[in-house]
Image: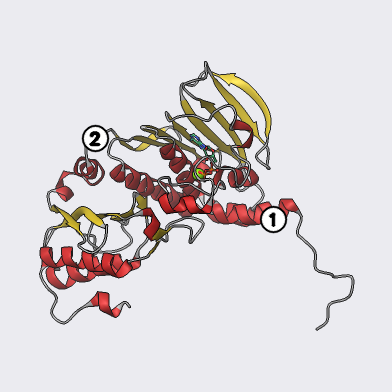
């Protein structure tokens, strides 16, 4: 059908473009918390407080003791595509930070009401800035907070009624609290020297003190019983600069999960980034279940795999939430995981999953 002549193609208004992309970056309470926590970690914080009120709909606040935001950067801190982390696409080859797109703060401003309080070591006192939907500063005043940054978010999804309603359902709300907790646990594991406190309506939901290593961090997240059934591993790939370490359940551990309705406790990190890697998940479950499962019940082993890989060999800019990571030498990484699994659980005759994956 032909379009009537007055319906010519036109560019969308700037505010519409902003809202469309912002609502893909911030899809839920947990994705918002993830962005703020990653900013705190990029600012080298050693302590992070996450506070939610009414499941995040009254308030989400993330406070850190990191570097703070320099006065010169403050006017653009929440303007989209401004970042202190990279200056060109080439810098992704040596990326060390969680963030790099300069999109999170700007996106949050266009779907909620935001204020940022910050102080660097060079500042005499902290300043609270109120931001508008474009990420521009509308007012500022001195504040009493110490060094670091606090981002406070009110009226989440104020202009996205479907999403707001979707997450307001009681069941969904409670799930989101669990998911925030799971997310914070993951950062707690990968950053042992990080202190985390997570509160909801002023009640502490979960917290972790600073510890010395991954093992101690896992202990505080999973508990002594679970950890007593885990074994550490370390593996260096021969042909590539890939290093694997972590903890897997001992054969016939009593502490696997028997359904996925329990919280997911399979932690896979690539360069300290929590990722969803279906192939690795499948490999671990396959080996564990075929070699160790007692009564052939399908179980979901609890494990932690930490993959260290040259930044130039991965592409993290695949999805807005950065949980999908493409690896250049994925086969050799999968092979390495399989080697670890074989040495722990034994060889699976006739199954060469990695080769089937090509
Ligand atoms: P990105 O993290 O991709 O750079 P963001 O929108 O998340 O984009 O943040 C924009 C910039 O604001 C960051 O590059 C950083 O300089 C600054 N910033 C944001 N949050 C913090 C924080 N908690 N501590 C220090 N600086 C921050
Ligand atoms: Mg960021």
x then y, percent, for residue 206: 34, 39
x then y, percent, for residue 310: 34, 54
Q: How crowded is mark 1: few (under 14 residues within 10 Å), some or many (20 or more)?
A: few
Name the quadrant of the N terminus.
bottom right
Is residue 250 rendered to the left or right of residue 175? left
Q: Mark 1 points at which residue?
A: 17
- What residue is shown at x 48% (from left), y 58% (from top)? 317
Q: Is residue 295 visible in the rendered structure shown here?
A: no
Q: Residue furthest top?
A: 124
Is residue 175 rendered to the left or right of residue 224? right
Q: Give the quadrant of residue 303.
A: bottom left
What colour scheme does the image use? Answer: secondary structure
Label 1 CB-ligand 1 distance < 8 A: no
Q: Nearer the viewer, residue 330 or 265?
A: 330
Lower sequence index among marks 2 and 1: 1
Q: Which mark is residue 252?
A: none
Q: How crowded is mark 2: few (under 14 residues within 10 Å), some or many (20 or more)?
A: some
- What residue is shown at x 61% (from left), y 28% (from top)? 129
- What residue is shown at x 47% (from left), y 40% (from top)? 39
x then y, percent, for residue 358: 33, 78
Q: Nearer the viewer, residue 162 or 16?
A: 16
x then y, percent, for residue 313: 37, 60
Is residue 283 rendered to the left or right of residue 270? left
Q: Name the residue under label 2.
A: 211
Answer whether labels 2 and 1 touch (C-beta < 8 Å). Answer: no
Name the element at disc 2.
loop
**In the depicted structure, whether residue 246 falls above or below residue 134:** below
Inter-mark Cα distance, 2 to 1: 44 Å
**In the depicted structure, whether residue 254 falls above or below residue 95:** below
- What residue is shown at x 27% (from left), y 67% (from top)? 332
Q: Is residue 269 visible in the rendered structure shown here?
A: yes
Name the element at disc 1.
helix
């Amino acid at each position: 059908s032909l379009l009537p002549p007055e319906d010519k193609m036109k560019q969308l208004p700037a505010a519409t473009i902003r809202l469309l992309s912002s609502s893909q970056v911030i899809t839920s309470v947990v994705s918002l918390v993830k962005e703020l926590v990653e900013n705190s970690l990029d600012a080298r914080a050693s302590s992070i407080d996450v506070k939610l009120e009414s499941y995040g709909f009254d308030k989400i606040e993330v406070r850190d003791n990191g570097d703070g935001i320099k006065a010169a950067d403050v006017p653009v801190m929440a303007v989209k595509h401004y970042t202190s982390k990279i200056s060109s696409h080439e810098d992704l080859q040596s990326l060390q930070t969680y963030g790099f797109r300069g999109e999170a703060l700007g996106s949050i401003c266009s779907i909620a009401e935001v204020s940022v309080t910050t102080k660097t070591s060079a500042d005499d006192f902290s300043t609270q800035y109120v931001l508008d939907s474009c990420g521009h500063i509308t007012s500022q005043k001195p504040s009493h907070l110490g060094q670091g940054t606090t981002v406070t978010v009110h009226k989440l999804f104020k202009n996205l009624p479907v999403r707001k309603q979707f997450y307001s359902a009681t069941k969904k709300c409670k799930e989101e609290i669990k998911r925030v907790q799971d997310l914070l646990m993951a950062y707690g594991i990968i950053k042992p020297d990080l202190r985390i406190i997570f509160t909801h309506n002023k009640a502490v939901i979960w917290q972790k003190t600073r510890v010395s290593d991954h093992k101690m961090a896992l202990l505080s997240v999973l508990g002594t019983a679970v950890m007593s059934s885990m074994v550490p591993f370390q593996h260096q790939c021969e042909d590539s600069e890939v290093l694997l370490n972590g903890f897997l359940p001992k054969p016939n551990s009593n502490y696997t999960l028997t359904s996925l309705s329990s919280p997911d406790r399979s932690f896979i990190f690539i360069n300290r980034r929590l990722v969803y890697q279906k192939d690795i998940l499948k490999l671990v479950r396959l080996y564990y279940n075929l070699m160790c499962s007692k009564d052939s019940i399908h179980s979901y082993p609890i494990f932690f795999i930490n993959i260290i890989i040259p930044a130039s060999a991965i592409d993290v800019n695949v999805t807005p939430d950065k949980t999908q990571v493409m690896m250049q030498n994925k086969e050799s990484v999968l092979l390495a995981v399989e080697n670890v699994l074989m040495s722990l659980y034994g060889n699976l005759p006739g199954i060469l999953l990695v080769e089937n994956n090509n």
